[in-house]
Image (cartoon, grey):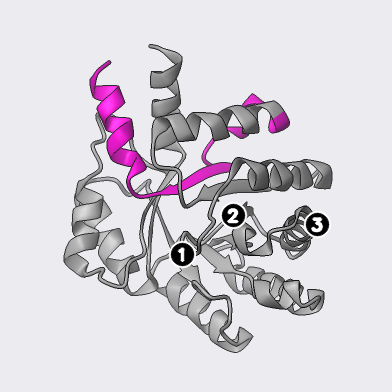
Amino acid sequence: MTQHQKDAALAVALMDLTSLNTSDTSKSIQALVNSINPTLGTPAAVCVYSDFVDDAKIALAARELNHVKVATVTNFPTGDAPLSDVINETLISIERGADEIDLVIPYKKLIAGDVQTVLSYVSESKKACGSRAQLKVIIESGELKTDALITQATELAIEGGADFVKTSTGKVAVNATLESTKIMLTAIKKSNKRVGFKAAGGVKTVADASDYLALARAIMGDDYLQANTFRFGASSLLSDVYKILKSN
């Protein structure tokens, strides 16, 4: 197996196979789950809007893929919803069976210097998740722009109890980049806490994924590259992964 193929196999195991489109339907979520080919590799999770958590769970169970987690998003994508709505959304999603909650921080508040609000969104969401769901916190690094703000957002997410810190929603001009990944992983390492990292938006090929895997390996070490600490949020990456693994 070449390094490229090894990276492809690793990328699928670390993938949150994602569909967050306004045009999503029960049928399209079913098709998303059906695109998984277990003989070539199974993703860590499927990430869908809360309304489709049930559909994803049922479709996965029908294929005996119950070990694949179902993730959903809150405060998505703008980060502007009132905290009470976000907590409500979180609790409803967990009732529907969500295993993971990807929360968008109110990043515009952080840009305006309001640290406390950001922290409360994370810590209250963490409280709502309790032991029933993991909390993955989206900082929207492409909108924060500066190293200082990206570092600060990562630190606040960790302080609030995030299980993962995630780059992006995939809905803004700049999503995951290697630069922001390096800043975020460095902040995670410095915290000395076991916090995962998720690169989302713009990781479309195994070649892209390889760069992120190499960077994470360099900063965090080999054992960080497992599904409980490292994820890719992607939709088109799966087909490239399978293409490479089929040619094996």
Sequence-wise, the earlier of marks 2 and 3 is 3
The amino acid type, in three-letter code, at marker 2 is Lys
Label 1 belongs to which residue?
A: 171
> Which label number is shown at residue 166?
2
Q: Tell me if residue 135 is in the magenta stretch.
A: no
Quarter of the view holding residue 7: top left
| Distance between mark 2 and mark 3 Cα atoms | 16 Å
Gap in angstroms between the C-alphas marked 1 and 3: 22 Å
What amino acid is found at the position of numbered circle 3 in the picture? Ala
- Residue 125 % position (x, y): 63, 73
Q: Earlier along the polypeptide chain: callout 2 or callout 1?
A: 2
Residue 92: which quarter of the image?
bottom left
Q: What element carries label 2?
A: strand
Given this view, does label 2 or label 3 mark the residue nearer the observer?
Answer: 3
Q: Specify the segment rendered in magenta.
A: 219-248
Viewer-side label of 2, 1: 1
Q: Which dot marks residue 148?
A: 3
User: Which residue lies at the image location 24% right of the left edge and 45% below the top edge?
Assistant: 64
- Measure how far apart labels 2 and 1 are at the Cα level: 13 Å
Q: Where is residue 133? Give x, y as percent.
A: 53, 62
Q: How crowded is mark 1: few (under 14 residues within 10 Å), some or many (20 or more)?
A: some
The quarter of the image holding the C terminus is top left
Q: Which residue lies furthest to the top in this view?
A: 1
| Label 3 crowd (10 A; few <14 / some 14-19 / many >=20) | few
The numbered mark at residue 89 is: none
